[in-house]
């Protein structure tokens, strides 16, 4: 599905944050040893959601091109897999998380690029969250080998 | 993406907000229709003359104490109001979409613009300060004080049901005046919701009131001897009449009127960035903006002109039309069936006059299962000349006219031949041409590579010629001047 309006893009970003938060909540439940790490991601997702919504709500103006800003931002490239099956082990789930984080990062980078016509706060927040997602990937990789 | 939840679940019966109380009107009630769904969402009264009197009397009573309230204490109420507006941001925005038809992005933008005026008005302790000069003569000092005047009224339009009263009301009350808002009878719900928040913010009774109704209520307010001034936004004939009426009896007035805005596109314009800006300008708010682009004036050779028309029409034809609460929708319905019929009339006139319709929005493709009662699609005419009715008169709908000029000089001549002077924009890569345009064009709001030259809250919302009647404008410092009298004191002590 192609996203065209600012409202659609913000809602999609919020959906990604909510879905991935739910995924990490389940991981925290399943792998008690890494509970704190996963819950910190959940907390960060909530903050990201707030940042995105606030940036949009505080800079949106009826006179800007909010309705025509995002032509070509296709959600198909960013659909994330968040289902957890009982028999999946930590390695498999971390690989799933890495894949998810990569997609979310790419979404934010693309959204940042396509929102240049809006006030700078919006692309800036998208870029900031993309950076955080990249950092998270590094943290996830450490879980493969906690001694590193 | 989903259609957002409607905040109005059942038909509201709107009341007046007079003297801090919600009171039922004795006047006749009419339906407020959601133009996208055609469902009745509220019933609003046409208030009686007695109810107008009650509101003015309540304001008069409240004024003497309110003007003595320290500016800092007055602006604390505005800070509280700002917080409440933020808390209710989404509900306020969705209400606008339901009563007006605009898209949710546009409604949120309107809410934000309204809040910005409250924010600017919270600076009143600094903004309202006077001036002084010592020793204008030996031992004599002179200073200027800005004092409030009393009771003002605001007669609001339908196209920005939430924002427009906020161009005036926060400044009126911050400077120590009282204000009575008469919302548009077509979409008054936003002002009711706003007044609920005003009440919650702790403004004393009578300071900020809402009286519903149409022309008769406006008349009663304007003729009331205790109303010191009026703020109006609407059509040119009504603005002229209000200006005249207020002038005769010595009331202050800001009368913002109609428009026919030209967008000049020079051959060196960056079309990739220009076209999306023009879509918002011509079709945003379904063309129901006094700052909307109406006439695109293309300066360039045949090849550029052809490319411009192709790209403009291609982009316009892709605009998704539907219910504004559907996040994917880029253009909502007209605000009413009457508004749609009026625009249809102009399209017919354009065709009769010989303009070539290159995009016909009369039978729009609507996203979702909504009645087509108020919907029109983006429409575009080319081969339009400046003398045609469609190029001269305000259509107030999603209709773009494409005209040509041989150079900037001719473009400016065409703009000046039009009686309106609200806004004009130029799209160009040349700083020299942009400066020339800004310098010479007789319009109140100039856009340079900007499709909608909407002044921020800290700048005046300007206008010239038949687009504005008055001296001082709404918003920012000019609003402070409008709502205060300059008193000069010259003092000497022996």
Image (cartoon, coloured by chain):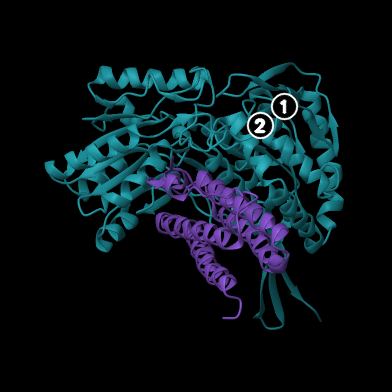
Quick one: B129 or B272, which is closer to the camera?
A: B272
Q: Chain of mark 2?
A: B
Residue at x 43% of width, y 44% of height: A76
Side of B486 relative to A127 (left or right): right
| Relative to B289, residue A82 above or below | below
Q: Residues within 10 Å of mark 1 (few under 14, many from 20)?
A: few
Question: Element under label 1?
Answer: loop
Chain corresponding to purple in the figure: A
Question: Element under label 2?
Answer: loop
Quickly name the residue at label 2: B6
Chain corresponding to cyan in the figure: B
Q: CA distance from mark 1 to mark 2?
A: 7 Å
Residue at x 81% of width, y 41% of height: B59
**Taking the image as drawn, is residue B485 in sight?**
no
Where is the C terminus of chain B found, in terms of image quarters? bottom right
Q: Are marks 1 and 2 in contact (CB under 8 Å)?
A: yes
| Relative to B35, residue A52 above or below | below
Q: Chain of mark 1?
A: B
Side of B196 relative to B246 (left or right): right
């Amino acid at each position: 599905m192609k996203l065209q309006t600012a409202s659609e893009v913000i809602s999609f970003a919020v959906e990604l944050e909510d879905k991935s938060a739910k995924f990490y909540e389940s991981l925290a439940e399943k792998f008690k040893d890494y509970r704190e790490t996963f819950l910190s991601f959940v907390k960060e997702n909530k903050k990201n959601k707030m940042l995105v919504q606030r940036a949009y709500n505080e800079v949106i103006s009826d006179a800007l091109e909010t309705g025509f800003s995002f032509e070509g931002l296709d959600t198909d490239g960013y659909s994330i897999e968040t289902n957890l099956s009982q028999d999946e082990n930590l390695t498999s789930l971390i690989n799933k998380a890495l894949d998810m984080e990569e997609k979310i990062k790419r979404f934010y980078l693309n959204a940042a690029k396509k929102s240049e016509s809006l006030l700078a706060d919006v692309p800036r927040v998208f870029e900031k969250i993309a950076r955080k997602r990249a950092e998270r990937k590094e943290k996830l990789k450490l879980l493969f080998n906690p001694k590193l | 993406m989903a259609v957002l939840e409607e905040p109005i679940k059942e038909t509201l019966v709107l009341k007046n907000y007079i003297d801090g109380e919600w009171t039922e009107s004795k006047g006749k009630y009419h339906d407020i229709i959601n133009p996208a769904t055609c469902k009745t969402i509220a019933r609003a009264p046409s208030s009686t003359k007695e109810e107008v009197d009650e509101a003015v009397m309540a304001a008069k009573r409240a004024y003497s104490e309110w003007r003595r309230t320290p500016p800092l204490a007055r602006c604390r109420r505005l800070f509280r109001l700002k917080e409440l507006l933020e808390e209710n941001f989404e509900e306020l925005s969705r209400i606008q979409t339901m009563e007006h038809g605009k898209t949710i992005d546009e409604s949120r933008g309107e809410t934000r613009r309204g809040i910005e005026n409250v924010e600017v008005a919270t600076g009143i302790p600094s903004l309202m300060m006077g001036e002084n000069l010592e020793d204008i003569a030996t031992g004599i000092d002179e200073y200027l004080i800005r004092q409030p005047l009393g009771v003002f009224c605001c007669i609001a339009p339908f196209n920005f049901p939430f924002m427009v009263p906020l161009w005036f009301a926060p400044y009126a009350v911050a400077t120590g005046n009282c204000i009575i808002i008469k919302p548009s009878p077509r979409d008054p719900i936003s002002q009711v919701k706003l007044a609920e928040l005003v009440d919650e913010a702790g403004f004393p009774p009578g300071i900020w009131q809402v009286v519903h109704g149409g022309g008769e209520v406006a008349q009663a307010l304007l003729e009331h001897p205790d109303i010191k001034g009026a703020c109006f936004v609407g059509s040119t004939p009504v603005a002229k009449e209000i200006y005249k009426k207020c002038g005769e009896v010595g009331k202050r007035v800001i009368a913002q009127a109609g428009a026919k805005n030209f967008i000049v596109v020079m051959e060196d314009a960056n079309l990739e960035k220009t076209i999306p800006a023009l879509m918002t300008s011509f079709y945003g708010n379904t063309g129901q903006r006094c700052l909307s682009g109406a006439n695109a004036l293309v300066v360039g050779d045949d090849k550029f002109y052809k490319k411009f028309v192709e790209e403009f029409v291609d982009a316009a034809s892709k605009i998704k039309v539907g219910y504004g609460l559907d996040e994917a929708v880029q253009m909502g319905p007209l605000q009413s069936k009457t508004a749609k019929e009026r625009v249809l009339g102009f399209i017919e006139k354009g065709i009769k006059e010989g303009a070539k319709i290159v995009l016909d929005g009369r039978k729009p493709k609507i996203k979702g299962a909504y009645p087509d009662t108020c919907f029109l699609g983006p429409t575009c005419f080319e081969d339009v000349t400046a003398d045609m009715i469609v190029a001269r008169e305000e259509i107030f709908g999603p209709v773009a006219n494409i005209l040509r000029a041989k150079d900037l000089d001719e473009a400016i001549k065409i703009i000046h031949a039009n009686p309106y002077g609200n806004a004009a924009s130029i799209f160009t890569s040349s700083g020299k041409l942009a400066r020339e345009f800004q310098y010479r064009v007789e319009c109140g709001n100039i856009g340079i590579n900007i499709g909608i030259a909407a002044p921020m809250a800290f700048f005046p919302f300007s206008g010239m010629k038949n687009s504005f009647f008055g001296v001082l404008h709404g918003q920012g410092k000019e609003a402070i001047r409008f709502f205060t009298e300059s008193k000069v004191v010259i003092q000497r002590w022996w």
